[in-house]
Amino acid sequence: MNLGKTVFAQLMDFVPAHEFQRCARRYRGDYKVSSFSCWNQFLCMAFAQLTYRESLRDIETCLRALGPRLYHLGIRGHVSRSTLADANETRDWRIYADLAQGLIRTARQLYAAESFGVELEQTVYALDCTTIDLCLSLFPWARYRAKNAAVKMHTLLDLHGNIPAFIAVAPAKIHEIRVFDQLLPEPGSIYIMDRAYLDFQRLYTVQQALAFFIIRSRKDFRFHRVGSHPVDKRTGLRCDQTIRLKSFYPAKFYPDPLRRIRYRDAETEKNLTFLTNNFLLPTLTIAQLYKCRWQVELFFKWVKQHLRIKTFYGLSPNAVKTQIWIAISVYVLLAIIRKRLGLDLSLYQMSQILSLTLFEKVPLLQAFSQIHRTDDMEQPCNQLDLFYL
């Protein structure tokens, strides 16, 4: 039933208000704040993400143009670009990081049974990072090279529903391998990684946690073969071997045997070599799981194309992280709504619909279902044609 709420207000109803207030109190976000609260800041930034606003002035102009309708969006404070800029600069970004983690826990429960192409009972993660380029003159704290600045968004993606289970935003000069030190491997889970994360000492921590990894190997590492297993070369497999590391430090840091699999991808015509500590899964399944790692690349592409994380509204590290975490919150919120409403729409279609219907007072489900309506021009009518061909 339509209660007179705007689509934007109905959308924000899916954000747990009590959990948000708990996050704000944890980091004293509303301490000595009289009008423009953390919730108002989140609403303004979420509005900017959903409507593709390019700057603080753009956000201010659009929201002020709403006049009295601004109240029906849930925004109670006075919106000005200076107030929003100060909030992004000073209020702790961890407020929105904790909120995003709460939404992520909800989304992962909803998508726990979602298929990703390989039928497994274990949780499967894809670990990778993407670089977000910045202007060196405006973001000197993020210096990457002599004339470049950037930050990296390290992401551990749960392939069941493509929900990010872990995200860390750090300057780009910090190597990807150091993200291992922040991860707590889950026993029984499978972690899929590219060869940039090949560090045998850190991989052994995954082994000791009773978790599994699949990673591409480099060409320069030395090993000796312990045994071989037959493979069907018609499927693209070339070998399935049990090996031990031969070089001094790798053998010291990883003393257990490894499984080495070579596979030729028919689509790219590339020979790929994988290392894994899982000796139970079929050989072809290991190769198929590594191909699923591409889902994290598609996640990065979607976020960069449809959310605002390439142009930033503030210049400090706190403002950049605040914007990125709110963008992730919006992504996960759309995923939650898609599952709870049972929508047969992609997240892209949902974001496009919302960008045009945020101010309409229609039920949220009706706003999304209009895309399936038959075009009225296809219905027969008694109107005469104006032109004849």
Image (cartoon, rainbow, N blue to C red):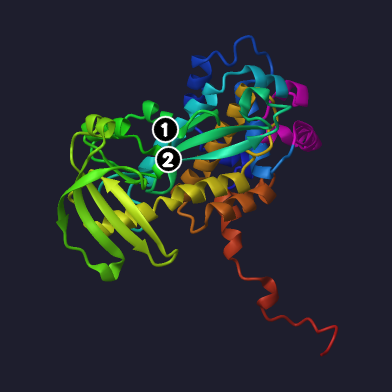
- Residue 40, given in percent of the width and then of the height, sits at 64, 26
Picture disc at residue 177: 1
- The count of marks equals 2
Q: Which residues lie in the magenta part? A: 55-84
Proximity of marks 1 and 2: CB atoms separated by less than 8 Å = yes
Nearer the N terminus, badge 1 or badge 2? 1
Q: Position of residue 234 (x, y in %)?
A: 28, 71
Q: Could you tell me which quadrant the C terminus lies in? A: bottom right
For label 1, the SS is helix
Q: Amino acid at mark 2?
A: Ala
Q: Hey, which quadrant is residue 125 in on the image?
A: top left
Describe residue 175's horizontal placement relative to residue 227 as left or right: right
For mark 2, what is the residue? 196
Q: Amino acid at mark 1?
A: Ile
State whether residue 102 is above or below residue 346: above
Q: Is residue 52 above or below residue 42?
A: below
Residue 75: percent from the left, percent from the top?
67, 29
Q: Is residue 72 magenta?
A: yes
Q: Residues within 10 Å of mark 1 (few under 14, many from 20)?
A: some
